[in-house]
Image (cartoon, helix red, strand yellow):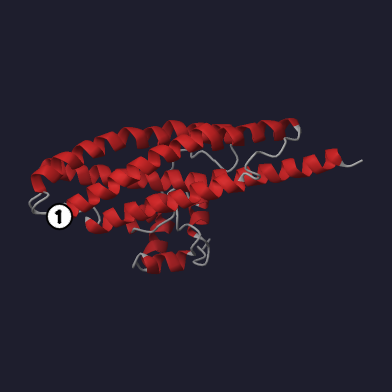
Amino acid sequence: MSIDVSKPVKDLVAELPNAARVFEQMGIDYCCGGAKPLEEACRAANVGVGEVLQALEETRAESQESVEDWGQAPLAELIEHIVQKHHAYCRREQDLVTHLFHKVVQAHGAKHPELRHMQSLFDQMQKDLLMHLVKEENTLFPMILEMERAASRKQPLPRPPFGTIRNPISMMVREHEDSGAELNEMKQLSHGYEPPEDACNTLRNLFQTLKAFEEDMHQHIYLENYILFPRAVEVERRLDALREDVSRP
């Protein structure tokens, strides 16, 4: 079956388990920019559509481990996966990256001023991300879980104080876009996390860690923007319909 180049990148990630890995290798944005058609995303990444299609087709022939279908799993399981895997990773790696930046900026900041700029970007992103994770874990995710439980029991819920789940979701998506922009700027400053010729082992380790951090953030944002949040909106729609049914005389 041929791949439709007009299909959004996010849909290809959902259909082809290895597509995310291909897009990471090709520099194609499948998280914040996942709504772009594949052809447009290839142009933005300055990579040939044919090359990407070939790589995607090759992934179909590779043996695959079972991949969790998060589009069908209970939202409680998806949220637990996001928190335990991606939120925990984010918190853990931020401390490591902060430590590595401190060392390399002291050693190489004079010769490579871009490192100071990258450190500043990461520090700001770190502060914003930590607050972002708290808002999700303490407010948004519990509300989604309560909605899912109510929907499973077919019991209507009163409207939340913020009106609709779309409001906090929109805020989270905007914050994802901010983090994505900061990560992209760091990637550009480092020429794709390619260490300079005079890089010490600590600087090489920093760039490897940043690259892995970026890849995990892409997976993290993809799961929330394109799977968790749309499914939460659909649950709210079902609860709204149930509330209307109950209120009818």
Q: Is residue 19 left or right of residue 193?
A: right
Residue 162 in picture, x, y percent from top left: 62, 42
Is residue 182 placed above or below 107 in the rendered structure? below
Is residue 246 placed above or below 32 in the rendered structure? above
Question: What amino acid is labelled 1 in the image?
Answer: Pro
The residue closer to the viewer here, 50 or 40, is 40
Residue 108 in picture, x, y percent from top left: 10, 48
Extreme residue in the right direction: 249
Residue holding disc 1: 113
Residue 72 in picture, x, y percent from top left: 60, 40
Identify the residue shown where x is 47% and y is 52%: 174
The residue closer to the viewer here, 196 or 177, is 177
Q: Quadrant of residue 57?
A: bottom left
Identify the residue shown where x is 30% and y is 57%: 185
Q: Quadrant of residue 94?
A: top left
Q: Is residue 218 left or right of residue 204?
A: right
